[in-house]
Amino acid sequence: MTYWGDRFRNHALWAGVSSAREQVNELRIDPDDAPSNQLLAYVGQVIELLERRSDETDALEVAPASLDSTSAAVAELVSGLQNVNSEAWTMANVVPMADAVMNTLASWPPLKPARYLSGIQAATDSFAAKVQEALASVSSGLEDTDKRLSDLVTAESDLQAQIDEQKTRIAEAVAEFTTDSKEQVDALLETQDAEVSDHIRLWSEKNQAHEAEAAQLIAQLHDHEETARSTVHATTALVVATDYGQYARNKNIAAWICDVAAALVGAAGVSAILVHLYTLDGVADSDVGVSMTRLAASLGTLGIAALLGRRGAQHHREARAAKRTDLALRRVRPFIVDLPRDEQQEIVLDFTERVFIRGDLDGSGAPDDPTLRQRIQQLREARRSQAATDEE
């Protein structure tokens, strides 16, 4: 091992990262608390990035000052997570400390794109595991409810046995005391019937209460399942949208560089022509070859400027298309949430086919293909026709 490798591997930063991971694994967040779960996912991604840095960063490229500053920020993050586990803080109090860790990582050399995407996927899998753990907890509660229902069924059987026993005793009493007065027999029957009615009423009330509780628990289970599915889909869409956003920023930077270069080169060409026109020399300019050479150099400069300007315009178009795709990925579901489910599926299918299959970010498909508006109109007409047929 080299000197810089030992210095990198043995730094106190990595012990702090391990402590942060232990604190995160001990967190118990309510599955219904969506904001806290999102903040937990963010902190988990920060720790996952630190762990990836430990394995995939070249030790020679990281200075001791960067290691020390990141180690101090991680120590603050561990302290904040401990406060959350002791219920003194909430996840919102830990976010500034996670942001401070990300700020210190800005001075580190960047990861390779493949490694960076792998880290994001690992963080997403970690958060999905947390959601799965929450679902397992809800499933355990459902099993407890089933057990309680089974106990109620057993109690119902015992109560029915007692009712049958009471009826038998009444019949035996009637047969044994036939010589007694009719009033005494009627009084005895009324007493026994009242006891049986009370037992039945109490059992019915308890049974209804437990059935309502079981229905509520099952409804909560379905809500947790939908929440987990929506969280995983939203996380995946956010990861893909971030890639398109970064691509749009890169293209925008490249476009501005081309625009500035085109302006500078074009200005140089125009300046050369103006200098040539204002500094005419009768002796030197009498040579046609020299004049043509100067003119060709000036026009060539202007041609280069035009080419750079055209490339800049192309980069601008690609940046706008990528930015629109980024916004669509982030906002398409909130905009279509009130539409019928089949229309939502049609919109998502159209977007997926255009962006991820055809790679058409600008939305310029074949002119003969039916538009999304036309397909949705056809879908609504088919729905109305089916409703009319069902009424007939």
Image (spheres, rainbow, N blue to C red):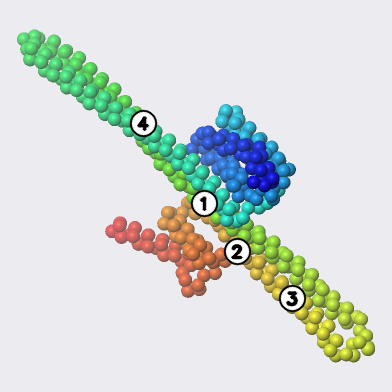
351 vs 172, left or right, is right
Q: In this figure, which residue is indicated by the disc labeled 1?
A: 236
Taking 376 as reference, is 305 above or below it?
Answer: below
Query: Considering the image in quadrants, where does the C terminus appear?
Result: bottom left
Q: Residues within 10 Å of mark 4 (few under 14, many from 20)?
A: few
Between disc 3 and disc 2, whose residue precedes?
3
Secondary structure, mark 2, is: helix
306 vs 48, left or right, is right
Q: In this figure, which residue is indicated by the disc labeled 2?
A: 321
Q: In this figure, which residue is indicated by the disc labeled 4?
A: 144
Q: Looking at the image, which residue is at 62% across and 40% down?
A: 14
Q: Looking at the image, which residue is at 93% across and 85% down?
A: 281
Between disc 3 and disc 4, whose residue precedes?
4
Q: Amino acid under label 3?
A: Ile
Between disc 2 and disc 4, whose residue precedes?
4
Q: Amino acid under label 2?
A: Ala
Q: Amino acid under label 4?
A: Asp
58 vs 232, left or right, is right
Q: Amino acid under label 1?
A: Thr
Between disc 1 and disc 2, whose residue precedes?
1
Which of the two discs, 1 and 2, sits closer to the camera?
1
Q: Looking at the image, which residue is at 57% across and 56% down?
A: 114
Point out residue 306 in the picture as x, y percentages from the top left corner: 73, 75
Secondary structure, mark 4, is: helix
Q: In this figure, which residue is indicated by the disc labeled 3?
A: 304
Q: Looking at the image, which residue is at 60% across and 28% down?
A: 88
